[in-house]
Amino acid sequence: MTQQSVRPVAHLRQNPDGSWMEHDLKEHLTRVAEKAALFADEFSNGVWAKTAGLLHDLGKYNPQWQEYIRKNNGDYTEENHEQD
């Protein structure tokens, strides 16, 4: 498995039917950042919270971490997943 051939994921979830759902890492970081900014805008710290949200799982881009996520999720393989 090479990093170029595999989309970075934040999380993997097995569906009740046994198929797998990948949560794209970029999408995850963006959504967390947007949500954090909305909450922190109430006290004028939206920019700081957005930055923290973008950075909170940034280490998951590391190829070794991506391999760890995939290898430690039961029956997950690249062939039996769906992308959300």
Image: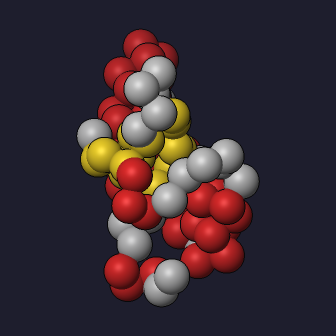
Above-or-below relation of 69 to 30? below
Residue furthest to the top in view is 42
Q: Residue at x 47, y 21 (%)?
A: 16
Give the camera-side residue of 27 and 53. 27
Give the camera-side residue of 6 and 57. 6
Q: Is residue 59 visible?
A: no
Looking at the picture, how far across and down is residue 2, in whole percent? 48, 86
Q: Residue at x 36, y 80 (%)?
A: 5
**Label tally:** 0
Residue furthest to the front in view is 17
Give the camera-side residue of 13 and 34. 13
Above-or-below relation of 37 to 39? below
Above-or-below relation of 71 to 18? below
- Colouring of the image: secondary structure
Q: Is residue 45 visible?
A: yes
Q: Residue at x 50, y 59 (%)?
A: 77
Q: Residue at x 41, y 38 (%)?
A: 19
Looking at the picture, how far across and down is residue 40, in whole percent? 46, 23
State which quadrant residue 41 falls in.
top left
State which quadrant residue 47 falls in.
top left
Looking at the picture, how far across and down is residue 83, in whole percent? 29, 47
Quarter in which the C terminus is drawn: top left
Give the camera-side residue of 80 and 22. 80
Above-or-below relation of 54 to 71? above
